[in-house]
Image: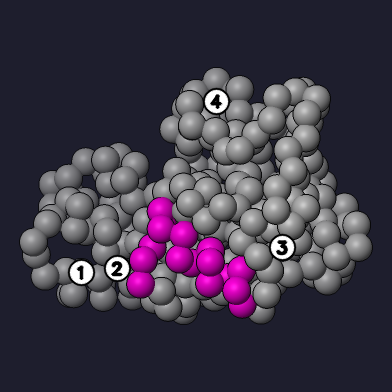
């Protein structure tokens, strides 16, 4: 398994700027100054819309939908098109998929506990941002459709050059929040997203909302935001969770 920087039980790791990860059995405390969230599968459950969009495309090209969904999680749409149909002009299908996703809000839900966590961050005036493989218009549509507050900082795929697993989006979010990357805590639900956070030198908490622990190959993991407790300590915040990285590989997250 590939783990984030993580001490043994009963130990605390200290990093530049005072960031820490502490583990006591299954209980994990992560300390930092800002929180960066992925959107789809992390804050927003858009599974129904995504599966409808890719289902139509996969059927048209006679590609197994499960293969498309497994690859597409956490990646920009163009990356998926180029992976399965390399060397083609994808402009027309990109536009078609974009239009479909922007028009579909039925079935868009907030991931359990997400609203509580975001409201707590806002009430405590702690910086947070969304870094997503969606473009800005779609990101705003889905966040609002899920009934979540729009962040001051959104870094969408159409405003950066390199998508996840490149850390460019997370670096840009940290810079706009005026927080050092190593003082940021990232929440992600896919391996490319987790890699992007780790590649940026950030602390990453994975969610079992989209992939199994076997697929994520990461620690710590949570089922959803009902497993999260946020405490403030001056300009820093401490996120306390119960690590679920040892759950069985086929055990689905709570819905």
Where residue 164 sits: x, y (%)? 41, 57
Q: Are marks 1 and 3 in contact (CB under 8 Å)?
A: no
For label 4, the crowd category at 10 Å Cα-Cα, with few meaning under 14, some 14 to 19 and many 20 or more, is: few
32 with respect to 38 (left or right): right
Q: Is residue 166 magenta?
A: yes
Of badges 4 and 3, the one in the foreground is 3
Of badges 1 and 3, the one in the foreground is 3
Q: Which residue is mark 4?
A: 251
The circle on residue 93 is 1
State the separation of the CA atoms marked 3 and 2.
Answer: 33 Å
State the separation of the CA atoms marked 4 and 3.
Answer: 30 Å
Among numbered discs 2 and 4, the one appearing first in the sequence: 2
Q: Is residue 200 magenta?
A: no
Q: Which residue is mark 2?
A: 97
**SS at mark 2?**
helix
State the separation of the CA atoms marked 1 and 3.
Answer: 37 Å
Q: Which residue is mark 3?
A: 34
**SS at mark 4?**
loop
Among numbered discs 4 and 3, the one appearing first in the sequence: 3
Where residue 232 sits: x, y (%)? 88, 57
Of 22 and 190, which appears nearest the observer? 22
Question: Can residue 113 be seen from the camera position used here?
Answer: no
Q: Which residues are magenta?
A: 161-176
Residue that appears at 49% across and 32% down = 2
For label 3, the crowd category at 10 Å Cα-Cα, with few meaning under 14, some 14 to 19 and many 20 or more, is: many
Among numbered discs 3 and 2, the one appearing first in the sequence: 3
**SS at mark 3?**
strand
Where residue 15 sits: x, y (%)? 70, 48
Quadrant of the image containing the C terminus: top right
């Amino acid at each position: 398994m590939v783990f984030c920087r993580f001490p043994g039980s009963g130990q605390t790791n200290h990093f530049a700027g005072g960031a820490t990860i502490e583990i006591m059995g299954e209980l994990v405390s992560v300390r930092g100054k800002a929180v960066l969230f992925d959107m789809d599968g992390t804050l927003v459950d858009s599974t129904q819309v995504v599966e409808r969009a890719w289902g139509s495309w996969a059927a048209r090209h006679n590609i197994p939908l499960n293969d498309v969904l497994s690859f597409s999680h956490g990646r920009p749409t163009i990356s998926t098109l180029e992976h399965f149909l390399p060397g083609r002009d994808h402009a027309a299908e990109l536009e078609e998929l974009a239009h479909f996703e922007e028009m579909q809000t039925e079935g868009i839900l907030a991931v359990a506990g997400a609203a509580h966590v975001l409201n707590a961050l806002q009430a405590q005036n702690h910086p947070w941002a969304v870094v997503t493989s969606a473009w800005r218009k779609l990101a705003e549509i889905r966040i609002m459709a899920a009934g979540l507050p729009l962040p001051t900082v959104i870094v969408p795929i159409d405003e950066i050059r390199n998508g996840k697993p490149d850390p460019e989006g997370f670096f840009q979010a940290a810079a706009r929040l005026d927080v050092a990357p190593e003082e940021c805590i990232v929440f992600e639900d896919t391996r490319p997203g987790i890699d992007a956070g780790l590649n940026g030198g950030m602390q990453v908490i994975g969610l079992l909302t989209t992939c199994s622990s076997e697929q994520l190959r990461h620690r710590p993991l949570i089922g959803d935001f009902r497993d999260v407790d946020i405490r403030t300590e001056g300009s820093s915040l401490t996120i306390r969770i119960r690590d679920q990285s040892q759950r069985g590989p086929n055990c689905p997250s709570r819905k």
